[in-house]
Image (cartoon, helix red, strand yellow):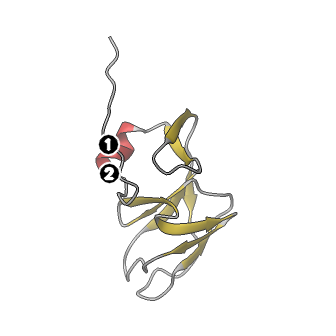
Amino acid sequence: MCAFYTEQFDPSDALTPDEIIFIQNLYIRASGDADNIALIGGNTSILVATGAVDDSNLVFTFTSTPQLVVVNGVTYRNGHGVTIVTTTATLDDPVGLGGDCYGLG
């Protein structure tokens, strides 16, 4: 028996840690229509962010393009809390001193 998780998608919502656990080996690629997302199976890698973790830096680089960026436990996708261009992610808000930032790809 299969169980399906359904919920109305609000484009302004960021993924919660519980939702990330739910999609452990899936990643999200948003299409041009923000109301429709495709879940694509695959191995998700944690990508180390390079950049100052402080109260002012907004720019981080990765060794490959992240599909999602996680900041202090909250997950953002391109255009919603972060702008991703190739291997560079520009956050809408700084991580904060002592915070955490990494990518999923």
Tag 1: Cα neighbours inside 10 Å, few (<14), some, or many (≥20)?
Answer: few
Q: Helix or strand or loop: what does disc 1 sit on?
A: loop
Going by the numbered disc 1, the residue's amino acid type is Gln
Going by the numbered disc 2, the residue's amino acid type is: Pro
**Mark 1 or 2, nearer chain start:** 1
Above or below, comparing residue 66 to residue 35 in the picture: below
The x, y position of residue 35, in whole percent, is 45, 47
Spatial separation of the CA atoms under disc 1 and disc 2: 18 Å
User: What's the residue at 41%, 69% (across, down)?
Assistant: 100
Q: Secondary structure at mark 2?
A: helix
Identify the residue shown where x is 35% and y is 57%.
Answer: 13
The residue to which callout 1 is attached is 8
Q: Quadrant of residue 54?
A: bottom left
Q: x%, y% of residue 52?
A: 52, 82
Q: Position of residue 24 (x, y in %)?
A: 43, 39
Q: Is residue 87 left or right of residue 90?
A: right
Q: Is residue 11 above or below residue 83?
A: above
Left or right: residue 67 versus residue 36 is: right
Point out residue 23 in the picture as x, y percentages from the top left corner: 42, 38
Q: Residue furthest bottom?
A: 56
Label for residue 17? 2
**Quarter of the image where one finds residue 48:** bottom right
Hey, which quadrant is residue 8 in on the image? top left
Q: Nearer the viewer, residue 49 or 69?
A: 69
